[in-house]
Image: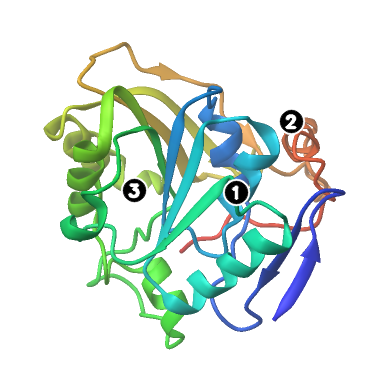
Amino acid sequence: MHTFNLSSQLMIEQSTDGYRYSIEPFLLVHFSKLLTGTRLLDVGAGCGIIPLLVAMQTSIKEIVGIEIQKSLYDIAVNNISRNDSSDRIRLIHGNFINAGLISTLNLFDTIISNPPYRKLNTGRINPNHEKAIARHEISIDLNSLLSKTSSLLKYKGKFIMAYPPLRLREVQERLYFYKLFPSRLRFIHSSSEADSRIFLIEAVKNQQVECIIEPPLFVYNKDGSFTKEMEKIYASFNYFSRSHHIKEK
Protein backbone atom coordinates (compact mmCIF):
# COMPACT_ATOMS: atom_id res chain seq x y z
CA MET A 1 0.00 0.00 0.00
CA HIS A 2 1.03 3.60 -0.64
CA THR A 3 -0.24 6.55 1.37
CA PHE A 4 -0.28 10.03 -0.17
CA ASN A 5 -0.72 13.43 1.45
CA LEU A 6 -2.86 14.95 -1.28
CA SER A 7 -3.35 18.23 0.53
CA SER A 8 -3.01 19.89 3.90
CA GLN A 9 -6.29 18.22 4.82
CA LEU A 10 -6.38 14.85 3.08
CA MET A 11 -4.45 11.57 3.22
CA ILE A 12 -5.24 8.74 0.79
CA GLU A 13 -4.02 5.15 0.82
CA GLN A 14 -4.02 3.19 -2.44
CA SER A 15 -3.08 -0.32 -3.49
CA THR A 16 0.44 -0.61 -4.84
CA ASP A 17 -0.47 -3.05 -7.63
CA GLY A 18 -4.26 -2.80 -7.97
CA TYR A 19 -6.53 -0.17 -9.49
CA ARG A 20 -5.55 3.43 -8.71
CA TYR A 21 -7.49 6.62 -9.32
CA SER A 22 -6.18 9.30 -11.68
CA ILE A 23 -7.40 12.74 -12.72
CA GLU A 24 -11.10 11.87 -13.21
CA PRO A 25 -12.26 12.18 -9.56
CA PHE A 26 -11.01 15.76 -9.38
CA LEU A 27 -12.68 16.64 -12.68
CA LEU A 28 -15.96 14.99 -11.72
CA VAL A 29 -16.27 16.68 -8.34
CA HIS A 30 -15.31 20.06 -9.78
CA PHE A 31 -17.86 19.60 -12.59
CA SER A 32 -20.66 18.53 -10.24
CA LYS A 33 -21.71 21.86 -8.66
CA LEU A 34 -23.06 20.16 -5.55
CA LEU A 35 -25.47 22.06 -3.32
CA THR A 36 -25.54 22.32 0.47
CA GLY A 37 -28.10 20.08 2.15
CA THR A 38 -28.32 17.51 -0.64
CA ARG A 39 -27.63 13.76 -0.74
CA LEU A 40 -24.93 12.23 -2.97
CA LEU A 41 -24.24 8.66 -4.07
CA ASP A 42 -20.88 7.70 -5.57
CA VAL A 43 -21.13 4.50 -7.65
CA GLY A 44 -17.81 2.65 -7.67
CA ALA A 45 -16.21 4.45 -4.75
CA GLY A 46 -12.83 2.72 -5.13
CA CYS A 47 -10.49 3.95 -2.40
CA GLY A 48 -13.01 6.63 -1.37
CA ILE A 49 -11.42 9.52 -3.24
CA ILE A 50 -14.63 11.12 -4.60
CA PRO A 51 -16.53 11.06 -1.26
CA LEU A 52 -13.48 12.55 0.48
CA LEU A 53 -13.05 15.31 -2.12
CA VAL A 54 -16.76 16.14 -1.82
CA ALA A 55 -16.51 16.23 1.99
CA MET A 56 -13.60 18.68 1.70
CA GLN A 57 -15.45 21.11 -0.55
CA THR A 58 -19.12 21.06 0.45
CA SER A 59 -21.49 20.76 3.38
CA ILE A 60 -23.97 18.42 1.76
CA LYS A 61 -26.34 16.45 3.96
CA GLU A 62 -25.08 12.94 3.27
CA ILE A 63 -22.42 11.23 1.17
CA VAL A 64 -22.82 7.53 0.34
CA GLY A 65 -20.29 5.47 -1.59
CA ILE A 66 -20.81 1.93 -2.90
CA GLU A 67 -17.99 -0.37 -4.00
CA ILE A 68 -18.31 -3.95 -5.25
CA GLN A 69 -14.69 -4.99 -4.70
CA LYS A 70 -13.95 -5.95 -1.08
CA SER A 71 -10.26 -5.05 -1.36
CA LEU A 72 -11.05 -1.51 -2.50
CA TYR A 73 -13.92 -1.17 -0.02
CA ASP A 74 -11.57 -2.04 2.87
CA ILE A 75 -9.08 0.59 1.68
CA ALA A 76 -11.91 3.15 1.41
CA VAL A 77 -13.08 2.41 4.96
CA ASN A 78 -9.55 3.04 6.24
CA ASN A 79 -9.25 6.25 4.21
CA ILE A 80 -12.55 7.60 5.50
CA SER A 81 -11.48 6.81 9.07
CA ARG A 82 -7.97 8.25 8.79
CA ASN A 83 -9.46 11.51 7.47
CA ASP A 84 -12.02 11.70 10.31
CA SER A 85 -14.94 11.60 7.86
CA SER A 86 -16.88 8.59 9.15
CA ASP A 87 -19.63 10.88 10.44
CA ARG A 88 -20.15 12.38 6.96
CA ILE A 89 -19.51 9.46 4.61
CA ARG A 90 -21.30 6.11 4.59
CA LEU A 91 -19.73 3.25 2.65
CA ILE A 92 -21.49 0.15 1.35
CA HIS A 93 -19.81 -3.01 0.13
CA GLY A 94 -21.97 -4.57 -2.55
CA ASN A 95 -23.30 -4.59 -6.09
CA PHE A 96 -24.96 -1.34 -7.16
CA ILE A 97 -27.49 -3.12 -9.35
CA ASN A 98 -28.61 -5.41 -6.50
CA ALA A 99 -32.11 -4.05 -5.82
CA GLY A 100 -32.32 -5.67 -2.38
CA LEU A 101 -29.17 -3.90 -1.24
CA ILE A 102 -30.12 -0.39 -2.32
CA SER A 103 -33.90 -0.35 -1.84
CA THR A 104 -33.64 0.77 1.80
CA LEU A 105 -31.92 4.04 0.83
CA ASN A 106 -33.79 7.28 0.25
CA LEU A 107 -33.64 8.92 -3.14
CA PHE A 108 -30.58 10.98 -4.00
CA ASP A 109 -30.19 14.52 -5.32
CA THR A 110 -27.00 13.58 -7.20
CA ILE A 111 -25.43 10.33 -8.35
CA ILE A 112 -21.86 10.44 -9.60
CA SER A 113 -19.78 7.71 -11.22
CA ASN A 114 -16.50 7.04 -12.97
CA PRO A 115 -17.64 3.61 -14.23
CA PRO A 116 -15.88 0.91 -16.23
CA TYR A 117 -16.39 1.74 -19.89
CA ARG A 118 -14.66 -0.91 -21.95
CA LYS A 119 -17.05 -3.51 -23.36
CA LEU A 120 -16.18 -7.12 -22.67
CA ASN A 121 -15.41 -7.87 -26.31
CA THR A 122 -13.00 -4.92 -26.69
CA GLY A 123 -9.36 -4.83 -25.64
CA ARG A 124 -7.33 -7.13 -23.47
CA ILE A 125 -8.78 -7.75 -20.02
CA ASN A 126 -6.18 -6.86 -17.41
CA PRO A 127 -4.88 -9.89 -15.47
CA ASN A 128 -5.10 -7.85 -12.27
CA HIS A 129 -8.61 -8.48 -10.90
CA GLU A 130 -9.09 -4.99 -9.43
CA LYS A 131 -8.06 -3.29 -12.65
CA ALA A 132 -10.14 -5.63 -14.81
CA ILE A 133 -13.39 -4.89 -12.93
CA ALA A 134 -12.66 -1.16 -12.86
CA ARG A 135 -11.96 -0.96 -16.61
CA HIS A 136 -14.20 -3.55 -18.30
CA GLU A 137 -17.96 -4.01 -18.02
CA ILE A 138 -17.65 -7.21 -16.00
CA SER A 139 -19.84 -6.43 -12.99
CA ILE A 140 -21.83 -3.52 -14.45
CA ASP A 141 -22.51 -2.11 -17.91
CA LEU A 142 -23.87 1.21 -19.12
CA ASN A 143 -27.46 0.01 -19.40
CA SER A 144 -27.64 -1.46 -15.89
CA LEU A 145 -25.86 1.58 -14.45
CA LEU A 146 -28.38 4.01 -15.94
CA SER A 147 -31.40 1.85 -15.16
CA LYS A 148 -30.52 1.66 -11.48
CA THR A 149 -29.45 5.29 -11.36
CA SER A 150 -32.80 6.48 -12.70
CA SER A 151 -34.65 4.53 -10.00
CA LEU A 152 -32.59 6.14 -7.21
CA LEU A 153 -32.67 9.78 -8.30
CA LYS A 154 -35.17 12.34 -7.10
CA TYR A 155 -37.28 14.24 -9.62
CA LYS A 156 -34.87 16.74 -11.21
CA GLY A 157 -31.99 14.91 -9.56
CA LYS A 158 -28.67 14.92 -11.43
CA PHE A 159 -26.47 12.13 -12.73
CA ILE A 160 -22.83 12.90 -13.52
CA MET A 161 -20.21 10.62 -15.04
CA ALA A 162 -17.01 10.39 -17.09
CA TYR A 163 -16.95 8.32 -20.29
CA PRO A 164 -14.98 8.05 -23.57
CA PRO A 165 -16.13 10.05 -26.63
CA LEU A 166 -16.24 6.84 -28.67
CA ARG A 167 -19.42 5.94 -26.76
CA LEU A 168 -21.04 9.39 -26.62
CA ARG A 169 -23.92 8.55 -28.95
CA GLU A 170 -24.70 5.38 -27.02
CA VAL A 171 -24.62 7.32 -23.74
CA GLN A 172 -27.04 9.93 -25.06
CA GLU A 173 -29.45 7.31 -26.35
CA ARG A 174 -29.48 5.34 -23.10
CA LEU A 175 -29.82 8.48 -20.99
CA TYR A 176 -32.91 9.53 -22.94
CA PHE A 177 -34.34 6.03 -22.66
CA TYR A 178 -34.22 6.26 -18.86
CA LYS A 179 -35.57 9.84 -18.77
CA LEU A 180 -32.19 11.26 -17.84
CA PHE A 181 -31.84 14.31 -20.04
CA PRO A 182 -28.35 15.71 -20.76
CA SER A 183 -27.92 19.25 -19.46
CA ARG A 184 -24.14 19.83 -19.58
CA LEU A 185 -21.30 18.24 -21.53
CA ARG A 186 -17.56 18.90 -21.45
CA PHE A 187 -14.72 17.25 -23.35
CA ILE A 188 -11.37 16.71 -21.63
CA HIS A 189 -8.12 16.78 -23.66
CA SER A 190 -4.59 16.01 -22.54
CA SER A 191 -3.46 19.08 -24.53
CA SER A 192 -4.76 21.51 -27.14
CA GLU A 193 -3.25 19.30 -29.85
CA ALA A 194 -4.71 16.00 -28.60
CA ASP A 195 -8.08 14.41 -29.24
CA SER A 196 -10.47 14.19 -26.32
CA ARG A 197 -9.96 11.07 -24.21
CA ILE A 198 -12.99 11.46 -21.93
CA PHE A 199 -16.06 13.63 -21.55
CA LEU A 200 -17.99 14.71 -18.47
CA ILE A 201 -21.76 14.70 -18.72
CA GLU A 202 -24.57 15.85 -16.43
CA ALA A 203 -28.14 14.64 -16.94
CA VAL A 204 -31.34 15.66 -15.16
CA LYS A 205 -34.09 13.19 -14.28
CA ASN A 206 -37.49 13.79 -15.88
CA GLN A 207 -36.76 17.32 -17.07
CA GLN A 208 -35.77 18.08 -20.63
CA VAL A 209 -33.43 21.05 -20.82
CA GLU A 210 -31.10 22.54 -23.38
CA CYS A 211 -27.75 20.77 -23.20
CA ILE A 212 -24.90 23.24 -22.72
CA ILE A 213 -21.61 22.28 -24.38
CA GLU A 214 -18.99 23.76 -22.10
CA PRO A 215 -15.56 24.85 -23.41
CA PRO A 216 -13.06 21.98 -23.64
CA LEU A 217 -10.63 21.49 -20.79
CA PHE A 218 -6.95 21.08 -21.67
CA VAL A 219 -4.94 19.42 -18.89
CA TYR A 220 -1.34 20.07 -20.01
CA ASN A 221 0.61 22.81 -21.72
CA LYS A 222 3.07 21.96 -24.50
CA ASP A 223 5.92 21.78 -21.98
CA GLY A 224 4.08 19.17 -19.90
CA SER A 225 3.08 21.52 -17.09
CA PHE A 226 -0.53 21.83 -16.00
CA THR A 227 -2.64 24.50 -17.67
CA LYS A 228 -3.85 27.41 -15.55
CA GLU A 229 -7.37 25.95 -15.46
CA MET A 230 -6.14 22.56 -14.30
CA GLU A 231 -4.01 24.21 -11.65
CA LYS A 232 -7.10 26.10 -10.43
CA ILE A 233 -9.07 22.86 -10.21
CA TYR A 234 -6.35 21.20 -8.13
CA ALA A 235 -5.99 24.35 -6.03
CA SER A 236 -9.70 24.24 -5.19
CA PHE A 237 -8.95 21.00 -3.31
CA ASN A 238 -5.72 22.38 -1.76
CA TYR A 239 -4.14 19.62 -3.82
CA PHE A 240 -0.39 19.19 -4.06
CA SER A 241 0.04 18.87 -7.83
CA ARG A 242 1.59 15.65 -9.02
CA SER A 243 1.61 14.04 -12.46
CA HIS A 244 -1.83 12.52 -12.87
CA HIS A 245 -2.80 11.48 -16.37
CA ILE A 246 -6.16 10.90 -18.00
CA LYS A 247 -6.36 7.13 -17.86
CA GLU A 248 -7.64 5.23 -20.83
CA LYS A 249 -9.40 2.48 -18.92
Location of residue 224 with respect to 106 vertically, above or below: below
Instruction: Say which residue appears at 66% left-offset and 81% top-offset.
Output: 16
Indicate the secondary structure of the residue bearing disc 1: loop
Res. 24 visible in picture: no
| Mark 3 closeness class: few <14, some 14–19, many ≥20 residues within 10 Å | few
Q: How far from the left and from the top, in percent, is residue 41?
A: 41, 44
Q: Relative to 68, is 151 on the left or the right?
A: left
Which is closer to the viewer, label 3 or label 1? 1
Q: What residue is pinned by disc 1?
A: 87
Amino acid under label 3?
A: Leu
Q: How far from the left and from the top, in percent, is residue 174?
A: 18, 39
Disc tally is 3
Q: What residue is pinned by disc 2?
A: 229
Position of the N terminus, as image quadrant, is bottom right
Label 2 vs label 1: CA separation?
Answer: 32 Å
Circles 2 and 3, Cβ within 8 Å, touching? The answer is no
Amino acid under label 2?
A: Glu
Circles 2 and 1, Cβ within 8 Å, touching? The answer is no
Amino acid under label 1?
A: Asp
Q: How far from the left and from the top, in percent, is residue 78?
A: 63, 69
Q: Residue furthest bottom?
A: 127
Q: What residue is pinned by disc 3?
A: 166
Indicate the secondary structure of the residue bearing disc 2: helix
| Mark 2 closeness class: few <14, some 14–19, many ≥20 residues within 10 Å | few
Q: Residue furthest front?
A: 87
Q: How far from the left and from the top, in percent, is residue 118?
A: 33, 63
Q: Relative to 142, is 89 on the left or the right?
A: right
Which is closer to the viewer, label 2 or label 1? 1
Q: Quadrant of residue 168?
A: top left
Quick one: label 2 or label 1, which is nearer the N terminus? 1
Instruction: Say which residue appears at 70% left-offset and 40% top-offset.
Output: 56
